[in-house]
Image (cartoon, rainbow, N blue to C red):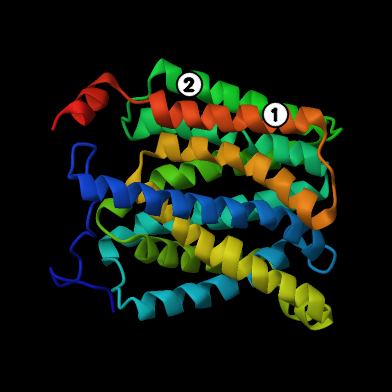
Amino acid sequence: MTGSASDQSAPPAHPPTEGSTRSATKSMPLMTIGAVTFTLLCWASAFVGIRDAVRYFSPGSLALFRYAIASVVLAGMLAATRSPLPRLRDWPRLALVGLLGITVYNLALNFGSQSIQAGSAAFLIQTAPLFTAIFAVLLLNERVTPIAFIGMGIGFAGALMIFFGEGKEVALEPGALLILLAAVVFSLFFITQKPLLARYSAIQVITVAVWIGTVLMVPFALDVGSEVADAPASGIWVVIFLAVFPGALAYASWSYVLSRIPASKAGSLLYFAGPVTVLISWLWLGEVPTLLSLLGGLLAISGAVIVNTWGRTTAKRNAAKQP
């Protein structure tokens, strides 16, 4: 039953503004930074896990199996927090969030990765922060300063240096269009859920979105049962990891981030994913990064810092200085 009473549908507590009390400004940024760090670590490690899991599952079956498990985990989190379901009037928008961020994104990424080099896919996904900023301005009326776009350009240049530092080559293959589609819908996934996070908690929004997105995957994974039965235990455990951490927990954590900061700034933080992926590959797989990759990582981080430090509007900067 959806929450229809006024006390059940009350919006979650909003984060303090930049001119709020000292104690609030100390606690909330740390929580947000923690959520960003956790999400990026999970999503960066997902590339390694997916690389392993696709040996045993087709793209559609992998997506459905992964998010079926994630749906159960999120249902447990929703019950544990005693959060009611969102009102039925908001379910059409939740369905759009699930369609874009769960169904289309994962299917496009999985199917596109079959016919395109992994390096090319990673490079194309790095366009998501730029799309997020553009859509945030056009659809959410967020004010993005010129220096913010400069910071995003620097971050993209850093991602490009990481890409070429790993010896990759961009190939114009048919799957590239699917990967580019994944980047676009992933940015729209941020934008479409942003208004919902003003009325509901992150766990309420992402749980229903994942449920709907998972159901929409079913026509693309009719052989999931037989593939799961034939997969080795190691492959099953990899999918469970992908479902619980990069899936359920990371999506919920990122929705929390979106409820605290503008979508354009949240998108810019994705530039940290490139350096984190390089670090994980170094520690996990023993893949030593090149000097160009390390410099690209520093540049990508610098771009994200510029956006989130100086990419504020003049009005917000003046408000932050007021007691």
- Circle 2 packing at 10 Å, graded few (<14), some (14-19), many (20+), is many
**Horizontal arrangement in the rendering, residue 171 relative to residue 259 (left or right):** right
Which quadrant holds residue 85? bottom left
Q: Quadrant of the C terminus?
A: top left
- Check the image and report above or below for 55 versus 35: below
Which residue of the protein is positioned furthest toward the bottom in this rendering?
229
Q: Quadrant of the N terminus?
A: bottom left
- Check the image and report above or below for 276 versus 76: above
- Residue ID at (38%, 20%): 145
- Check the image and report above or below for 277 versus 135: below
Relative depth, front residue between 36 and 98: 36
Relative depth, front residue between 207 and 157: 157
Residue 15 visible somewhere in the drawing: no
Residue 271 percent coordinates (x, y) = 58, 36
N-terminal label among 1 and 2: 2
Q: Which residue is mark 2?
A: 149
Measured Cα–Cα span from mark 1 to mark 2 = 18 Å
**Horizontal arrangement in the rendering, residue 191 relative to residue 41 (left or right):** left
Residue type at mark 1: give it: Gly
Residue depth check, mark 1 versus mark 2: number of the one nearer the observer: 1
Which quadrant holds residue 67? bottom right
- Residue ID at (71%, 28%): 295
- Check the image and report above or below for 315 versus 281: above
Which residue of the protein is positioned furthest toward the top in this rendering?
146
Residue 167 percent coordinates (x, y) = 87, 32
**Which element is circle 2 on?**
helix
Which quadrant holds residue 217? bottom right
The numbered disc on residue 158 is none
Residue type at mark 2: give it: Phe
Q: Which residue is mark 1?
A: 296
Do the residues bearing badges 1 and 2 touch, measured as CB atoms within 8 Å? no
Residue 221 percent coordinates (x, y) = 69, 68
